[in-house]
Image: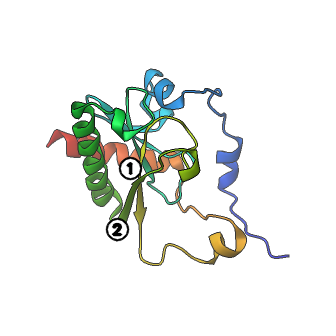
Amino acid sequence: MPSLHAHWRMEYIQAPRFPETKRPFTDLPALGNDREALIVYRSPLSYLMLNRFPYNPGHLLAIPFREISDLEQLTPEESADLMATLTFGKRLLQAAMNPDGVNVGFNLGSAAGGSIPHLHGHLVPRWNGDNNFMPVLGQTRVLPQALDQTWERLHATAATLSAR
């Protein structure tokens, strides 16, 4: 049987996990430690964080601070802020990671893949040729960068972009 060696992943596997919570998207911003929570940017009504289980390096989540589960529950102000945060996230990914494209979307409801009942949008950076045989044949994703390194890069770029 062939083996894939990714020795650098052991640090991630053995790292302490957050306490289990039924409301991670509400609890994480309240931690007061954006690095630990993987939050790279805060706007007045929403925030961007790295996905802990990314499809690609830089996979971001855009999340309103108020706990809601559907787009129709957003106030007009929250809707405008969330769209501005998504747009900022795309600009951030372009500046920090230079992808060839970005997938943007929402999984609304459990049948659509929504695993956490709190509204959140996904921004997944994509590069030409980034999808290979591993996810298809090996049911394995190969991520070339650790979450903490990606956080450092995006957080620094977010600070620069938001200061403009």
Pick whichever of labels 2 and 1 is earlier in the sequence.
Answer: 2
CA separation, marks 2 and 1? 18 Å
* Amino acid on which the number 1 mark rests in the picture: Arg
Q: Which residue lies furthest to the left in this view?
A: 164
Query: What numbered label is drawn on residue 153?
Result: 1
Q: Name the side, left or right, on which 49 lies relative to 131.
A: left
Left or right: 139 with respect to 55? right
Image position of 100 (left or right of 141):
left
Marks 2,1: beta carbons within 8 A: no
Residue located 47% across and 38% down the image:
38
| Marking on residue 164 | none
Q: Which x, y percent locates residue 22?
A: 60, 27
Disc number placed over residue 101 in the picture, else none: 2
Local crowd size for mark 2, using a 10 Å CA cut-off: few (<14), some (14–19), many (≥20): some
Q: As shown in the figure, which amino acid type bears the numbered disc 2? A: Gly
Where does the image place residue 97, in percent across and percent down from the top left? 36, 60
> Which image quarter holds the C terminus?
top left
Neighbour class for label 1 at 10 Å: few (<14), some, many (≥20)? some
Residue 75 point in image, percent of width and height: 27, 30
Query: What residue lies at 30% left-to-right and 55% top-to-bottom?
Result: 90
Q: Quadrant of residue 4?
A: bottom right
